[in-house]
Image: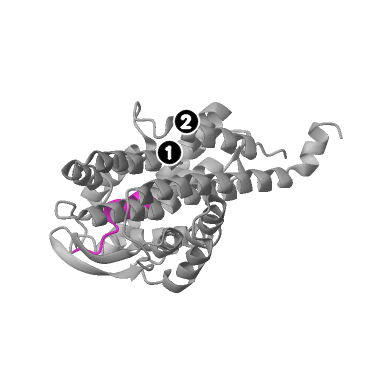
Amino acid sequence: MFNYFFIKFGIAYILDLILADPRWLYHPVIIIGKLISFLEKILYKAKNKIFSGAILNILTLSVTFIVSLLLVRTNYVVEIFFLYTTLATKSLANEGNKVYKILKSGDIEKAKKELSYLVSRDTNTLSLDKIIMSVVETIAENTVDGFISPAFYAFVGSFFHIELFGQMVSLALPFAMTYKAINTLDSMVGYKNEKYIDFGKVSARVDDVANFIPARLTGLIFVPLSTLILGYDFKNSLRIFFRDRNKHSSPNSGQSESAYAGALGIQFGGKISYFGKDYEKPTIGDKLKAFDYEDIKKAVNILYLVSFIATLVIISCSMMYNIPDLRVFFHL
């Protein structure tokens, strides 16, 4: 069976680079978020918070998967469009560049406000160095969540098809969109505070499992390779990755963050405030130089190249899988 995934994903990636997130329509992630909020109001009332949190996961992921299947059943255009909405390369780059431009203009207070839309930490008291660090850290972490993971699951899903209403449909979009639901669940209820420590436990664990392979591919291969091509510190990127990747409280965030920190010669972590409480985060990387505005631009450059290399790998692997069918297609 000929698999058109490499064409569909290539178009979706180009749309991501051109259009970023479609702010002119109701983004699928927003719809997923509203579903989670609706279900949370009902399920949070249960006494067994871990169990009700698990039910929240099952219902959210099931609905997302089924709706995605129905979308694929319509036509290729709809499938490609919704596949594109699972990718967030340009949107993440735009957010980083926005703070970069504000900082260059000298308006630190405005930069703090803009940053507050990107991170959950308190931004009011951040110094210039901490603002830059937070932006680069966010880009590093979301390289996985915003591109590599959804792309990875779309690729895996492309190898599976099921019959729906008499037509074989690919599971590429359902896999990618279900990952976005996993990630949205974690961002909404996967906290270790009093309210969500039990209710969000399953969401956090599922997200950890889902990002396990993509995070390590990003930190070990894609970021160092991009660093080498861009002329940043390739050796230090790998060195810090192997040394500091497991220092982070998250089993996955430290994978990409350590590679970014090494590539740019900067250090993440230290004293950070969340919801009015101060925390001392483990340091990742060595402070080989002071933070600079250009660190944000360099992080954006790495992000773009990581997404490009990963796309080339995905398309190449998908085409290789199709070689026998391509020969028939071109009458070779």
| Residue 43 visible, this angle | yes
Name the outermost residue toward the right: 332
Disc 1, SS: helix
Mark 2–mark 1 distance (CA, rounded to whole Å): 8 Å
Q: Position of residue 24 (x, y in %)?
A: 34, 26
Name the outermost residue toward the left: 276
Q: Are marks 2 and 1 in contact (CB under 8 Å)?
A: yes
- Sort mark 2 into few (<14), some (14-19) or many (20+) by Cα contacts within 10 Å: few
Please state which amino acid type lies under the numbered disc 1.
Lys
The residue under the point 48% across, 63% down is 237
185 inside magenta stretch: yes
- Span shown in magenta: 183-193
Please state which amino acid type lies under the numbered disc 2.
Ile
Answer with left or right where residue 251 lies relative to residue 12. left
Q: Nearer the viewer, residue 186 or 261?
A: 261
Residue carrying label 1? 90
